[in-house]
Amino acid sequence: MFAVIETGGKQYRVSEGDCIRVERLDASLGEQVEFDRVLLVGGEEQLITKEAQLKAARVIGRVTEQDRAAKIIGFKFKRRKGYKRKWGHRQYFTGVAILEIKA
């Protein structure tokens, strides 16, 4: 069984046992989180896309890590003008292990 969830403005296809990295959530390590924005639930032969059924669907996960991703380097350059600008950015993320999909 799999589900498509939305969190942090992005969509993720998840199954039970998956570990995903999502935008930072307000939850501590080991805490359970519930994703209620379920867009689709599918199984071996069934596919649930009706809004009424999806409103009751939930995906339960456990927070496994709170960290920052690898550094991304930004660089601007204009030739022959002596202009260079370099900066770095590390995005916060939350690691979530998917425990259960309730349809």
Image: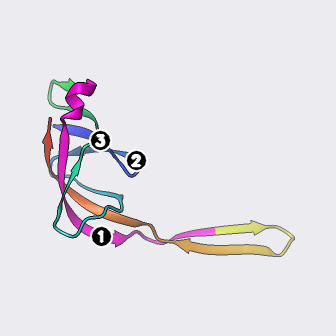
78 or 22, nearer to the observer? 22
Quarter holding the N terminus is: top left
Residue at 23% of width from left, 26% of height from top?
52
The amino acid marked with disc number 2 is Lys
Percent position of residue 69, x then y: 40, 68
**Among the two numbered marks 3 and 1 on one chain, the one whose residue lies closer to the N terminus:** 3
Tell me, for residue 37, which label it has, or none.
3
The amino acid marked with disc number 1 is Gln
**Among the two numbered marks 2 and 1 on one chain, the one whose residue lies closer to the N terminus:** 2
Residue at 42% of width from left, 48% of height from top?
9
Q: Quadrant of residue 33?
A: bottom left
Residue at 44% of width from left, 67% of height from top?
91
**Among the two numbered marks 3 and 2 on one chain, the one whose residue lies closer to the N terminus:** 2
Q: Are marks 3 and 1 in contact (CB under 8 Å)?
A: no
Q: Which residues are magenta?
A: 49-74
Percent position of residue 83, x then y: 79, 73
Q: Is residue 61 above or below residue 71?
A: above
The amino acid marked with disc number 3 is Arg
Q: Rate crowding at label 2 as few (under 14), some (14 to 19) or many (20 or more) other CA atoms within 10 Å.
A: few
Residue at the spot of label 2: 10
Label 3 vs label 1: CA separation? Answer: 21 Å
Quarter holding the C terminus is: top left
Label 3 vs label 2: CA separation? Answer: 11 Å
